[in-house]
Image (spheres, rainbow, N blue to C red):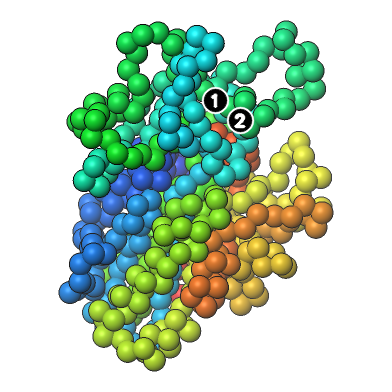
Amino acid sequence: MESMNSSAHAAGHATDYAADLGRYIFASPSSYHAVSEAARMLIAAGFTQLSEREAWRDVSGKRFVIRDGALIAWQAPPGIPVGAGFRIVGAHTDSPGFKVKQDPTFGHLGWRQLAVEVYGGPLVHSWLDRDLRVAGRLVDRGGRALLVESGPVARIPSLAIHLDRDMAAGVTLDRQRHTQPVLDLDSEGGAELVQALAQDAGMAPDDVAGFDLYLADTQAPAAIGLGGDLLAAGRLDNLSSTFAALRALIRASDHGDGTGFMSIVALFDHEEVGSASSSGAAGPVLEDTVRRIAVGLGLGEDEYRAALAASICVSADAGHGIHPNYPERHDPTQWPHLGAGPMLKVNANQRYASDGIGAALWRGWCDAANVTTQAFVSNNAIPCGSTIGPITATRLGIRTIDVGVPLLSMHSIRELAHADDLQGLALVLQEFLTGAS
């Protein structure tokens, strides 16, 4: 990643934080890579991985578990007082884009092309004419999964304006016909993509029995703007929150076991497609993990329920900053700006889970962390999206607060954030997880 301008916001090192985030993003082209990088960070900070398939003999201290593209990590004291509760930060590891189909390549008009389907709700036109890599996991016949990543191998070419003069008025793309990337000329002897990825990973091509592969940009995150304090990168929605949650938990764990409650970070997959999966927020992965930890810490059922009643979840997911070229698309009186701090996200129809009590708590943590905050409310005529917040509140029945950093170009292949907001979110989440206020 290009280095941040050292003169911009030197106090507080927000640009250094953004540079660290950029490196994490570039190393995480898929949810599986994001979880692998998260595990590496946690292990370096003294966390120990547990297996869901084994009995958990000791759940206290620093622990984490992985389920496919999801990870749950925690810092637990040896015993949790009844009613102390759990403090949970939720985020997600996936981003909208394209997933490779099961019959991955095909020949057409002299070209070898990659068969893809749309994943979630990307700004499809932003993927045109980009140098793309393929990343994800290969699974062998024994069920072993290996992470794989190619170099720049694919491109979704746009149509020249000379062949469609109407394109000057706007690009209209058919999500099937116009989004299949080219890989190479369809000549004999060319290596098929999956076989080439297998060889690079040290797996015999004939051993590949399954895969989950996605397209990703090859351009590294970069510091841009006159002051160098803007971060341009893919997957800021929502690796900006994933990284902030991890950094907060690791820093909070340095305080030891004196918090008197359990600090948890839950990183889910499949948020962009509704969260309804075994590794998504609508599945039981968080509820099962929290219950297993509570049992391991000696809480009975009634004590567990009492702890849930005292628990809080901060759902961290990126939001929309005011767009200078489209102000009419925002609420006419509440304009969150990039650089003005992480946002409290509120919606009357419970698309976000924040309420008045949660808002007061959030502002208290922001004050304690010396971080400014701002509110996001949608234009009444433009329904907003949703997050894992309402899902978590529904599944666990705990108070949940929706927050996130403001972005421009959300769901583009390359989004834009401000370094101060990115670091500010991590600082507030650390305050939340340390229990200092």
Residue 290, by quadrant, is bottom left
Question: Is 284 situated left or right of 360 in this image?
Answer: left
Report helix, strand or loop for mark 2. Answer: loop
| Relative height, residue 126 to residue 95 (above, below) | above
Q: Residue at x 36, y 9 (%)?
A: 188
Marks 1 and 2: in contact by CB < 8 Å? yes
Asked whether the viewer can see residue 227, the reply is no
* Picture disc at residue 176: 2
- In percent of width and height, residue 177 lies at 62, 25
Q: Amino acid at mark 2?
A: Gln
Residue 126, by quadrant, is top right
Q: Quadrant of the N terminus?
A: top left
Q: Residue at x 68, y 28 (%)?
A: 173
Question: Is 296 situated left or right of 31 in this image?
Answer: left
Q: Residue at x 41, y 60 (%)?
A: 278
For this orientation, the residue located farthest to the bottom is 302
Residue 288, by quadrant, is bottom left
Q: How busy is the neighbourhood of tag 1: few (under 14 within 10 Å), some, or many (20 plus)?
A: many
| Relative height, residue 235 to residue 367 (above, below) | above
**Distance of label 2 from label 1 (alpha carbons):** 7 Å
Q: How busy is the neighbourhood of tag 2: few (under 14 within 10 Å), some, or many (20 plus)?
A: few
Q: Amino acid at mark 1?
A: Gln
Report helix, strand or loop for mark 1. Answer: loop
**Dot 1 corresponds to which residue?**
180
Residue closest to the eye, 262 or 101: 101
